[in-house]
Image: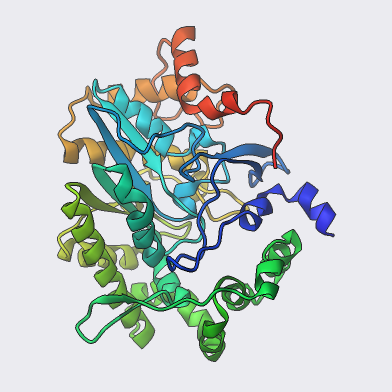
């Protein structure tokens, strides 16, 4: 079964290769300099190449630690919606966004720090570990509703009596846990198990916290639906605690970002059933803005499209497909240009340049909806390919692990 899974489920390689870190209170970090594959939902087993660069970013281009002169760096931090493992890298929103920004006449680098499964606590720690040293000018946290659940499930941070964040100590995992983490079969069995949300923490977190997780196992279902409780206005002590820790994390992250002369924004990422969670998004926006942080609510943006939400999500998966990422690019670009004072020639600029970008990767997996058919030269195609698929060319002969 292990051998079969290594052939038919290459996406599980990502979990097996994750670098587990205990001394920095992170559950896992993205691998560095790794080439692997991932399947695309809804496509009958079609797989695409995934490359993690030397910084651990899922981008097929490289970045130096030292920021190039006269360049503005924008870092996106979030979970699987940000990392975008399920689609080819050039459709991930960070790449066409990078292209659009660079067409405005200035130099930009958009970095994708997304890590599958991360919550607010890990994202804050990731910024401290990886973001600060890269001298980012703008930091964007992509909030997804299950981040509230993850704050409590992770058990990485808590609040002291003064409402300040402190970190819970982590113990090194034992030999058995380190061993079972290395098998595809482990993650496959967890994936098909109805007790996934209960057993996964046992695998990822240290043994000292298992008893706490077990004591809460009967409450896992309402814990999983904290955003739903929030949307329906149902009071729950765990929801209140999660919101308090969430607020403290954002306050501390904003202070750290601002102290490094950077701007901090939060983007609300709509779930597949974002209409059901409408009140949750409205309340979260009010809460975050109350902390003095500017917010882009993409659930409103998606609602404005007046289309069935299935257009933007995979049928067999809860994540954005290429169309969802395309819509995110448009609204993120408008949001950032407004905040950063960037001038551009209206919607025509976005539509024509997105056409040039997407149609440089034939055949495009997006529709021409909201794009403007325009001239695309071979030299521009080559320039776009060489920038956003640079590592594919460097590693074209290296075997996929």
**Is residue 178 visible to us here?**
yes
**Where residue 315 appears, x then y in whole percent?**
60, 50
Q: In this rendering, would 81 be left or right of 287?
A: right
Above-or-below relation of 378 to 124? above
**Where residue 326 appears, x then y in whole percent?**
43, 37
Residue 165, by quadrant, is bottom left
383 vs 279, nearest the viewer: 383
**Where residue 156 appears, x then y in whole percent?**
42, 74
Q: In this rendering, would 298 be left or right of 189?
A: left
Above-or-below relation of 276 to 176? above
Q: How is the image coloured?
A: rainbow
362 vs 366, nearest the viewer: 362
Q: Which quadrant does the N terminus fall into?
A: bottom right
**Where residue 290 appears, x then y in whole percent?**
16, 65
Q: In this rendering, would 228 be left or right of 253?
A: right
**Residue drawn at (60%, 77%), measured in percent from left and top?**
202
| Residue extending farthest bottom | 215
**Residue drawn at (58%, 28%), measured in percent from left and top?**
392
277 vs 142, nearest the viewer: 142
Q: Which quadrant does the C terminus fall into?
A: top right
Above-or-below relation of 176 to 91? below
Q: In this rendering, would 157 be left or right of 47?
A: left
**Is residue 145 visible to us here?**
no
Residue 201, by quadrant, is bottom right
Looking at the rendered structure, the number of numbered marks drawn on it comes to 0
**Residue drawn at (56%, 31%), measured in percent from left and top?**
365
**Residue drawn at (39%, 45%), measured in percent from left and top?**
306
């Amino acid at each position: 079964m292990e051998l079969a899974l290594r052939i038919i489920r290459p996406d599980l390689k990502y979990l097996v290769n994750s670098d587990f870190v205990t001394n920095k209170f992170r559950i896992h970090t993205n691998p560095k300099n790794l080439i692997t594959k991932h399947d695309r939902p809804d496509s009958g087993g079609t797989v695409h190449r995934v490359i993690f660069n030397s910084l651990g970013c899922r981008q097929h281009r490289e970045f130096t630690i030292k920021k190039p002169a006269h360049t503005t760096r924008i870092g996106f931090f979030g979970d699987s919606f940000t990392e975008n493992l399920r689609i080819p890298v050039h459709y991930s929103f960070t790449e066409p966004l990078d292209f659009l920004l660079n067409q405005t006449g200035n130099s930009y680098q958009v970095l994708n720090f997304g890590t599958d499964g991360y919550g607010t606590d890990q994202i804050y720690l990731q910024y401290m570990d990886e973001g600060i040293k890269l001298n980012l000018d703008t930091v964007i946290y992509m909030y997804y509703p299950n981040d509230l659940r993850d704050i409590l499930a992770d058990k990485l941070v808590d609040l002291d009596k003064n409402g300040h964040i402190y970190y819970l100590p982590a113990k090194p995992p034992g030999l058995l846990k380190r061993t079972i983490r290395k098998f595809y079969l482990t993650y496959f069995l967890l994936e098909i198990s109805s007790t996934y949300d209960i057993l996964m923490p046992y695998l990822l977190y240290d043994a000292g916290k298992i008893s706490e997780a077990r004591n809460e196992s009967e409450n896992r279902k309402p814990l999983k639906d904290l955003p739903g409780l929030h949307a329906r206005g149902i009071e729950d002590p765990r929801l209140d605690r999660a919101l308090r820790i969430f607020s403290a994390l954002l306050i501390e992250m904003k202070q750290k970002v601002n102290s490094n002369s950077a701007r901090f924004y939060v983007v609300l990422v709509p779930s597949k059933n974002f209409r059901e969670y409408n009140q949750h998004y409205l309340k979260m926006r009010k809460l975050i803005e109350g902390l003095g942080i500017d917010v882009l609510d993409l659930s409103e943006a998606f609602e404005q499209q007046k289309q069935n939400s299935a257009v933007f999500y995979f049928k067999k998966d809860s994540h954005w497909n290429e169309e969802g990422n395309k819509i995110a690019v448009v609204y993120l670009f408008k949001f950032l240009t407004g905040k950063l004072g960037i001038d551009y020639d209206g919607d025509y600029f976005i539509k024509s340049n997105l056409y040039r970008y997407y149609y440089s990767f034939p055949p495009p997996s997006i529709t021409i909806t909201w794009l403007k058919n325009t001239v695309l030269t071979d030299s521009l195609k080559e320039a776009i390919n060489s920038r956003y698929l640079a590592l594919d060319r460097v590693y074209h002969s290296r075997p996929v692990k």
